[in-house]
Image: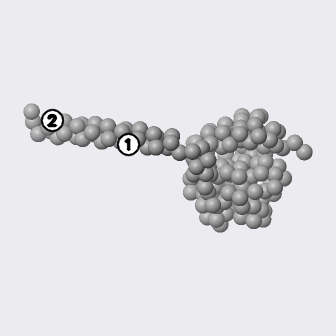
Amino acid sequence: MDELEMILIFLFIVFITILIVTYKQLISLNKEIAYLPKEIKRDLQNSHPLIGESIHEVGPGNWDIVKKDVIIQFASPSCASCHSAIEELIEANKLYNTEIYVVMMPSEDNKESSNFREKYKDLVTILPYSREVTEIMNITQFPTFIIVNKEGIISLVTVLIKKLDYFMIQMLKTHGDTNEV
């Protein structure tokens, strides 16, 4: 065997070892999480500092948000998962019956921003972007979703659309059609 083959075999063995150790740690952590009471798991998942705050106090004054349950998505025109998340929200909204707002992050590509606006303008309300708001709300990933209830109180902040979906379905089970006037 030459030296290159020896190095490749060594790297392969190191890779497999790391993979096995990581997998075992994942199994161990999943077992530990399974022992946690549901209340603790739920609290750990919903611990964002904005939960319980008024969107009217933390959001900018130029956001005109209706007094019903709403979903606000922070999205970037260049973010492929943001586009698919908007599509999923629009489809799921047949069940949720909420207003969907999108805060479009600025893009260096004006054509990309224009295409984004044009594509979704009739399907969602696009809110004006504000750097201060993203800093106050600690928005660092896209997409990020915020659920605001009828009273304007933030109920959930998440980057996971499945978590948003679970939360909305639980809310529907608990309160029925929450947006009936």
The percent coordinates of residue 4 (x first, y second) are 15, 39
Position of 75 relative to 175 (above/below): below
Q: Secondary structure at mark 2?
A: helix
Give the quarter of the figure containing the N terminus: top left
| Location of residue 162 by image quarter | top right
The percent coordinates of residue 60 (x first, y second) are 74, 64
Give the quarter of the figure containing the C terminus: top right
Residue 14, numbered label: none
Q: Residue furthest left?
A: 1
Task: Kindly check if marks 1 and 2 are in contact, taking CB atoms under 8 A apart as contact.
Answer: no
Q: Is residue 109 visible?
A: no
Give the alpha-carbon distance from disc 1 to disc 2, as whole Å.
30 Å
Q: Residues within 10 Å of mark 2 (few under 14, many from 20)?
A: few
**Between 178 and 28, which is closer to the camera in this rendering?**
28
Q: Nearer the viewer, mark 1 or mark 2?
A: 1
Position of 31 relative to 136 (above/below): above
Q: Amino acid at mark 2?
A: Glu
Q: Is residue 11 left or right of residue 143?
A: left
Q: How many numbered marks, from 0 up? A: 2
Q: Amino acid at mark 1?
A: Gln
Compare marks 1 and 2 and give the one earlier in the sequence.
2
**Between 32 and 11, which is closer to the camera in this rendering?**
32
The percent coordinates of residue 72 (x first, y second) are 71, 50
Q: Secondary structure at mark 1?
A: helix
Q: Residue visible at 76% across and 48% down?
A: 70
Residue under numbered circle 2 = 5
The percent coordinates of residue 166 (x first, y second) are 66, 39
Residue under numbered circle 1 = 25
Q: Is residue 162 visible?
A: yes
